[in-house]
């Protein structure tokens, strides 16, 4: 466990401060709060970033906080460098605002050497040479809760030996401005569950070292507690306000307790979300009553945000650490700033900590867009029967929906893909940061009134509209009968990389330039998770909900997480969405981060003349369903989700080591599917039209499969669609599995000659039993997913 | 099929004054306007809404039929929400102001007071046998709770918590163990709830509700609706012809909706422009009646179409139709032939007491 | 004071009404633009409700509207002025009562 926040530079200082009820909220020094009326916060004073000179990635304060917490977590976990090198260690971090300011600065300055801030998961992985998956959860204030949940699932799925999981965020003018225009900031230090007149922003990071019980016991690790249950849900209520009934917050907590096999009666301590805003605090009271019933007044519930402020993406991690400290040290962290005259109907542990044994502690977090997470921690590792004595559910693909350059709706996409019709063309797209003119892929906006009521449509940004449209299409395609099926249990997982970049840039600009005239309506649009929130709201979905950033591989991680939820019986239906848009801002960021150029001529994957790529807008929705559920309703599946693998890169450059990583990731994905390379007859490549990158993947495909697979590169048709890439490729594979339609690679006139492979270069059909899908976030991570026929 | 008698009639005091509105006879006043109105503005008024029709429209084509008749979108209406809008005839004239609820088998349409018969006839005529249309009033009773403390009454009468029910929200609940429906809708701008339940329980539910509120007649309801500028079809046009624009009911019509009965006629009416428009007024005297002429220095500029005595203001207020050139708030007109004046004012004429008061159940 | 002294002439009424119409039109344009309302500004009436069943606005819209009114009319709105969002007419009443002087020609409306 590693912690850095306003009341502690490490976990031990944090623990002492919790016990002493220290409030770390005061005037802020390093952030310019400009015109905002609030200039207090939970600031980390005298913070010295770790030097780490060998780490070439670009960092900001949020990332530096993450590195500090991760260093402490690794050091106290007893994993030395030698042990670390022998293990596969992944990183899963929640963040809300990391790099926002730097991104805005980057977009506005014409300095080619400037690169965007790398996300915290990436920097931590590279900083400590960890080669496992890197996951960037970006569902705002519950991001760390989600990051920890995904990390737990990676361990359960056996895709990592150890996961570093947590969250980090730094104070920034951007968030002061945003919460100010929403009138959400308390001018005095916040008083959660007490005065409840607003929140106070804070900053910090916390990282937990997670491993399976077997792994931890085998290496004699110092065990702080067990992460016994993770529950998630979506409010499906409103883009900014929580559902005041608290029923879905209660559902997340019930799901976590159920998974942990813990009765609500056994809960000794709840670390609430406790932001201090009236709507949150009131909603939580309702949720607590729903879960704890008559016992509510006896359950100690406190908000440590009263001491450290609301650290947004880090909140769930810092509060998880508080729960572990409560268990380890046997005391209840208090809610400070509680006015006299404490309520009788709740025990908010007012103003002073209390010594008490804590066996079971719960951490709750709730975010913009209605994403709820609950984590249950228990004392030591309990002896209990294996949680999952029944076989894992098989996962089928039973619905597809897509909006993008190839058209609106699956039939338009299927036609264009079958014929190899490219949507790449000269485009002109503008946003607050400027105008991009060049080759790209755009799409007509979905029409108002078709996919949601006009009143709901008005509240969505363009990304949310794409997501809602593609979701409606996928649900329609799945033939789920909304009158007969329990649709509200559907999980909603969104992958988007640059989803809200143009909104962030516009809001930041308006906040800086126009001061108090910044638009309250537009601030919620800057949260990446808003789009998923709109999907849940208009369709009425209340299953687990989260948002993942992290480039093209983010989509694969979302698919993997969705499949895990179904395999483990945590959901029967999961909607996985990948969506991103071409904008001036997204092109700026991507062409710098991925060393990619925009082609001036054509996107030519695997071609000698491949000189660059083109970016595109797309939203693809894939409905995953348990085989049993699909069979019960006579669904017509496209295919079956088999094994996947993600390999993290330890070097930034794209050299020949990338070929080894591609070979490794494809081999491991096949191994996890219990298949040999010879079983696969179709490969849907990541190749993006940039020769020096494409040949690294091509070498790996040639080495593993030779001419036995039909190879296609859909980016020649769709452009590079960032968070949607994995879903686009999965859609291509799904159409082949069910209908035998192969997608040709466009513009492939002079295939790179030195590799023996079989390109799909013209429209063709073939029976496909197994296909492999590749995606890369170049220089960061490489991923593969194997899918099979549903027959 | 038509029922003139309230389900709650047996519970009314003997001094109850009735009035006939359209096809219904409704309780107009139980005690005094001051008492009933006072309850509405300070605590909770209990309204017998038996005069409003409840019409179920069921069948596979229900969405098509209701969608074609209703002036707002119904496609995305869920069972958790309701929508208030108009039904128009082919000439774009209002048939009724209705609230539409989505049900498992179709829709439930709540009509305005006294208009059930004509609205059912309209739906049946337009549906031409494609849906099953049923008057649900004989089996379902409806009460309205309105006032700044209406939520307390709703919590007392309904078995389930109603915390967090948003405006226009609908929720299945039980009342005394019987299945019922509650919607957070009303007419007066105060916090408002409507409960619908099997009519055989009418007596017990009324008794329970009346014990914790003040039963109020439709005189109070119409007075407060006028003060809030909530349209009342049987009043707002006075003796003039009823039209959407003439009563200022534009906001009940979503012109972005591509197709509904009467839309083309309404667009033509809009494009032609109006000679007169409705404006709210308050008066400094008591003698105004429907048709009273208003003007300046003897020149006729409009006339009163609806007027009530407002206990809240202690004077008359209402709606006048004024020549479009002078149809504005903030002006003073002569009541022609008298020495009295009226001042045109902005809507709502009176701000509801519930605005700015939290609906909260912190204790329970 | 005689009745004629207390009341305006028809032409005075017309010119006052014209000014008022202009202010209402500006507020409606601002509403539609700023809140991205799917509605023709001319279809909004001066007296219709804005929140709840009217234009179906919510609390974030109210904040946006407050910023918009400040922008258009240089009038700051505080949280306790609940009545002012009752209708476009109410907004105009508020602006007329609170702003310092008339709309200046230089204030960029939208």
Image (cartoon, coloured by chain):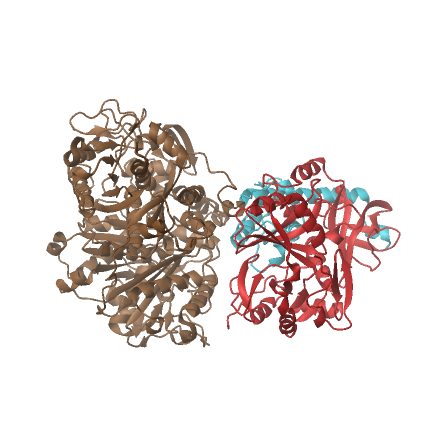
Residue that extends furthest to the left in the rendered view of this protein: A82
The residue nearer to you, when weighing A332 against B193, is B193
Side (left or right) of C33 relative to A302: right
Quadrant in which residue A303 is drawn:
bottom left
User: Where residue C87 sits in the image (x, y, percent)?
Assistant: 64, 51
Quadrant in which residue B115 is drawn:
bottom right
User: Where residue A627 sits in the image (x, y, percent)?
Assistant: 31, 50
Side (left or right) of A270 relative to A677: right
Which residue is rendered at x = 18% and y = 48% of the image?
Answer: A131
Quadrant in which residue B5 is drawn:
bottom right
- Per the rendering, the colour in which chain B appears is red
The residue nearer to you, when weighing A76 against B273, is B273
Supply the letter of whichever chain is cyan: C
Q: Quadrant of the N terminus of chain A?
A: bottom left
Q: Quadrant of the C terminus of chain A?
A: top left
The image shows residue C83, relative to residue A16, as above or below, that is: above
- Per the rendering, the colour in which chain A appears is brown
User: Where residue B227 sits in the image (x, y, percent)?
Assistant: 71, 58
User: Where residue B108 sits in the image (x, y, percent)?
Assistant: 60, 54
The residue nearer to you, when weighing A294 against B122, is B122
């Amino acid at each position: 466990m590693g912690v850095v926040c306003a009341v502690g530079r490490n976990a031990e200082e944090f623990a002492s401060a919790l016990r002493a009820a220290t409030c770390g909220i005061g005037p802020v020094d390093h952030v310019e709060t400009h015109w905002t009326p609030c200039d207090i916060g939970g600031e980390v004073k005298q913070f010295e970033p770790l030097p780490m000179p060998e780490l070439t990635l670009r960092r900001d304060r949020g990332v530096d906080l993450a590195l500090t917490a991760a260093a402490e977590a690794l050091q106290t976990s007893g994993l030395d460098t030698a042990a670390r090198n022998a293990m596969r260690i992944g990183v899963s971090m929640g963040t809300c605002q990391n790099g926002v300011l730097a991104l805005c600065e980057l977009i506005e300055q014409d300095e080619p050497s400037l690169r965007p801030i790398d996300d915290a998961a990436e920097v931590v992985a590279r900083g400590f040479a960890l080669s496992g998956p890197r996951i960037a959860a970006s569902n705002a204030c519950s991001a760390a809760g989600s990051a920890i949940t995904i990390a737990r699932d990676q361990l359960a799925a056996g895709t990592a030996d150890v996961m570093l999981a947590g969250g980090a965020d730094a104070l920034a003018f951007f968030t002061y401005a945003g919460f100010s225009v929403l009138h959400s900031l308390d001018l005095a230090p916040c008083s959660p569950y007490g005065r409840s007149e607003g929140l106070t922003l804070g900053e910090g990071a916390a990282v937990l070292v997670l491993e399976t019980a077997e792994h931890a016991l085998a290496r004699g690790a110092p065990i702080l507690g067990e992460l016994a249950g993770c529950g998630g849900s979506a409010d499906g209520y409103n883009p900014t306000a929580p559902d005041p009934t608290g029923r879905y917050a209660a559902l997340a907590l019930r799901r976590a307790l159920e998974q942990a096999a813990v009765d609500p009666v056994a809960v000794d301590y709840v670390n609430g979300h406790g932001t201090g805003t009236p709507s949150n605090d009131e909603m939580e009271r309702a949720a607590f009553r729903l879960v704890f019933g008559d016992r509510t007044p006896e359950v100690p519930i406190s908000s440590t945000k009263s001491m450290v402020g609301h650290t947004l993406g880090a909140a769930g991690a810092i509060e998880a650490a508080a729960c572990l400290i409560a268990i380890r040290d046997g005391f209840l962290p208090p809610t400070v700033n509680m006015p006299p005259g404490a309520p009788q109907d709740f025990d908010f542990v007012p103003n002073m900590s209390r010594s008490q044994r804590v066996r079971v502690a719960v951490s709750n977090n709730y975010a913009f867009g209605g994403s709820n997470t609950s984590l249950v921690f228990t004392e030591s590792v309990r002896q209990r029967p294996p949680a999952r004595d029944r076989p894992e559910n098989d996962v089928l693909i039973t619905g597809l929906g897509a909006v993008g350059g190839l058209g609106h709706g699956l039939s338009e996409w299927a036609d264009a893909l079958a014929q190899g019709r490219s949507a790449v063309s000269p485009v002109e797209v503008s946003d607050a940061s400027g105008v991009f003119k060049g080759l790209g892929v755009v799409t007509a906006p979905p029409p108002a009134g078709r996919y949601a009521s006009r009143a709901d449509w008005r509240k969505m940004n363009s990304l949310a509209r794409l997501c809602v449209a593609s979701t409606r299409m996928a649900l329609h395609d799945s033939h789920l009968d909304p009158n007969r099926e329990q649709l509200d249990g559907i999980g909603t997982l969104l992958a988007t990389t640059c989803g809200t970049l143009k909104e962030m840039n516009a809001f930041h600009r308006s906040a800086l330039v126009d001061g108090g005239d910044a638009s309250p309506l537009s601030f919620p649009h800057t949260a990446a998770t808003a789009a998923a929130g709109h999907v849940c709201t208009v369709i009425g979905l209340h299953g687990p909900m989260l948002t993942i950033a992290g480039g093209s591989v983010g989509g694969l991680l979302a698919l993997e997480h969705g499949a895990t939820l179904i395999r483990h019986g945590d959901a029967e239906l999961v909607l996985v969405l990948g969506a991103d848009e071409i904008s001036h801002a997204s092109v700026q960021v991507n062409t710098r981060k991925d060393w990619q150029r925009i082609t001036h001529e054509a996107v030519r994957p695997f071609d000698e003349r491949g000189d660059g790529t083109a970016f595109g807008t797309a939203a693809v929705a894939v409905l995953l369903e348990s085989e049993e559920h699909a069979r019960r309703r006579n669904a017509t599946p496209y295919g079956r989700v088999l094994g996947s693998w993600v390999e993290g890169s330890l070097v930034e450059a794209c050299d020949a080591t990338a070929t080894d990583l591609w070979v490794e990731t494809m081999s491991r994905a096949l191994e996890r599917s219990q298949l040999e390379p010879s079983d696969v007859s179709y490969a849907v490549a990541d190749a993006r039209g940039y020769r020096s990158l494409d040949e690294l993947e091509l070498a790996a495909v040639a080495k593993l499969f030779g001419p036995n697979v039909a190879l296609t590169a859909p980016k020649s048709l769709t452009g590079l669609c960032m968070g949607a890439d994995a879903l686009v490729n999965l859609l291509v594979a799904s159409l082949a599995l069910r209908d035998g339609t192969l997608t040709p690679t466009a513009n492939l006139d002079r295939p790179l000659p030195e590799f023996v492979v079989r390109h799909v270069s013209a429209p063709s059909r073939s029976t496909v039993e197994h296909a492999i899908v590749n995606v890369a976030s170049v220089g960061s991570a490489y991923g593969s997913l194997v899918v099979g026929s549903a027959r | 099929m038509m029922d003139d008698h309230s389900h709650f009639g047996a519970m009314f005091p003997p001094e109850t004054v009735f009035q006939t509105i359209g096809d219904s006879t409704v309780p107009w006043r139980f005690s005094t306007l001051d008492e009933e109105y006072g309850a509405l503005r300070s605590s909770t008024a209990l309204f017998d809404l038996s005069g409003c029709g409840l019409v179920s429209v069921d069948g596979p084509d229900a969405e098509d039929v209701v969608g074609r008749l209703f002036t707002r979108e119904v496609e995305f209406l869920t069972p958790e929400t309701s929508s208030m809008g108009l039904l128009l005839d082919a000439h774009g004239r209002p048939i009724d102001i209705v609230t539409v609820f989505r049900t498992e088998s179709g829709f439930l349409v709540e009509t305005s007071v006294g208009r059930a018969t004509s609205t059912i006839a309209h739906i049946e005529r337009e549906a031409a046998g494609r849906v099953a249309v049923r008057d649900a009033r004989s089996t379902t009773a409806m009460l309205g709770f309105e006032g700044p403390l209406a939520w307390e009454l709703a919590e007392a009468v309904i078995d389930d918590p109603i915390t967090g029910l948003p405006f226009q929200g609908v929720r299945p609940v039980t009342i005394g163990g019987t299945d019922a429906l509650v919607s957070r809708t009303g007419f007066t701008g105060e916090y408002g709830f409507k409960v619908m339940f099997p009519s055989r329980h009418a007596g017990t539910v009324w008794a329970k509700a009346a014990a914790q509120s003040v039963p109020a007649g439709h005189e109070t309801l119409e007075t407060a609706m006028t003060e809030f500028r909530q349209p009342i079809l049987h009043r707002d046009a006075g003796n003039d012809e009823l039209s959407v624009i003439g009563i200022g009911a534009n906001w009940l019509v979503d012109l972005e909706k591509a197709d509904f009965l009467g839309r083309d006629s309404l667009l033509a009416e809009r494009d032609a422009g109006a000679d007169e428009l409705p404006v709210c007024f308050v008066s400094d005297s008591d003698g105004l009646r429907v048709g009273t002429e208003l003007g300046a220095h003897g020149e006729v500029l409009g006339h009163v179409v609806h007027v009530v005595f407002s206990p809240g203001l202690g004077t008359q207020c209402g709606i006048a139709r004024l020549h479009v050139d002078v149809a504005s708030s903030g002006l003073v007109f002569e009541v022609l032939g008298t020495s009295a004046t009226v001042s045109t004012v902005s809507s709502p004429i009176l701000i509801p007491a519930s605005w700015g008061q939290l609906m909260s159940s912190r204790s329970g | 004071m005689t009745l004629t002294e207390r009341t305006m002439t028809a032409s005075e009424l017309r010119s006052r009404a014209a000014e008022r119409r202009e202010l209402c039109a500006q507020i409606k344009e601002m509403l539609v633009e700023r809140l991205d309302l799917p509605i023709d500004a001319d279809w909004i009436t001066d007296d219709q409700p804005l929140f709840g069943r009217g234009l179906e606005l919510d609390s974030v819209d109210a904040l946006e509207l407050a910023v918009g009114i400040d922008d258009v009319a240089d009038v700051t709105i505080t949280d306790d002025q609940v009545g002012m969002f009752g209708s476009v007419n109410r907004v105009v009443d508020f602006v007329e009562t609170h702003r310092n002087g008339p709309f200046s020609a230089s204030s960029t409306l939208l």
